[in-house]
Image (spheres, rainbow, N blue to C red):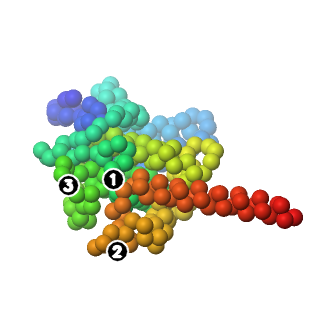
Amino acid sequence: MEFILNETKVTLPDSWNDVNWKKFKGFADLVKGFVPRSEESEGKAGELDNALMDLEDNTKILCYWTGLSEENISMIDLDTANEVMKHLEFLNEKYDPIHIEKFTLEEETYFLPKEFMKKSSFGRYIEAEQLDIQSNMLKEGNLGVLPRQIAILCKKEGEEEKIDDAIIDKRARLFEELDMATIWDVAFFFDQVRAKVNDTFPNLSGDGGDAKARRAAKATIDGYGWLNSLYGVAQDGIFTLPNETPLVSAQLANLYDVLTYLSWKSACGTYEKTLNDLHNKENK
């Protein structure tokens, strides 16, 4: 939408579809620098302090999205400034993701994995998961890792399962230009994948409570997530390919094949423990 501000024509985004990752990341960094409002501020002095901070923060927001200087923004009448801020309110609202199977950027089409990654590799899932874990440990949220996560998850038609790291690096930089609606949609997809994995293999995520939340918490605490299991699978050698190392073979193995194997091992371990407990009780 276009606004005339101090005789300058300014075009502002209308929705998440009009805001790319790079622009939104800059906005998020700007907002992080805002001073939190004190709940202890009382009386007219406290109200005035908060009002002045609101004015300062809103001025910075208007400068960021319009590209105008603080001096130019200060000359805009209050009604117009409020109209612009109201137009940008969607940036503070939660985006409702939709199901997508592909997206196009710079005339190239990229496809999300099919069937909740049932045909994807164990290594591909781990790479995407690790970015979530690292960002959570740094307490920065997952915004910063999303372009690279998308580069790992999404491929062009016909590409092999394992994509070269240099290509992923290049695409991660490219996907900084993706609109935030697509970014949120792909992030929602991976959340669904993690939930599906936990629901399909409940004995790998424990019993009781919300499986997704429990798995996310455990991954954050451990700092490794499913990476913990990768080396054990490689050591067992069940997925080892003729011309690959055990570790690379485990990474290339089908995600659901590996999780089925781990689920079976877990069930065997539970059975043996239960059997031993029964024998111990009988011997007492």
In the depicted structure, whether residue 246 falls above or below residue 190: below
Q: Residue at x 52, y 55 (%)?
A: 263
Residue 34 appears left or right of 66? right
3 or 2: mark nearer the eye? 2
Q: Residue at x 39, y 41 (%)?
A: 188
Q: Residue at x 23, y 64 (%)?
A: 164
Percent of width and height locating residue 187: 37, 45
Q: Nearer the viewer, residue 228 or 177?
A: 228
* Outermost residue toward the right in this view: 284
Q: Quadrant of residue 267?
A: bottom right
What's under tag 1, amino acid-wise?
Ser
In this rendering, does residue 37 appear at all? yes
Percent of width and height locating residue 57: 40, 42
Quadrant containing the C terminus in the rendered view? bottom right
Q: Residue at x 30, y 47 (%)?
A: 113
Quadrant containing the N terminus in the rendered view? top left
The residue carrying mark 2 is 245
Helix, strand or loop for disc 3? loop
Q: Residues within 10 Å of mark 1 (few under 14, many from 20)?
A: many
What's under tag 3, amino acid-wise?
Glu
Helix, strand or loop for disc 2? loop
Percent of width and height locating residue 47: 54, 35
The residue carrying mark 3 is 159
Residue 158 appears left or right of 192? left
Q: Residues within 10 Å of mark 2 (few under 14, many from 20)?
A: few
The residue carrying mark 1 is 120
Q: Nearer the viewer, residue 9 or 120?
A: 120
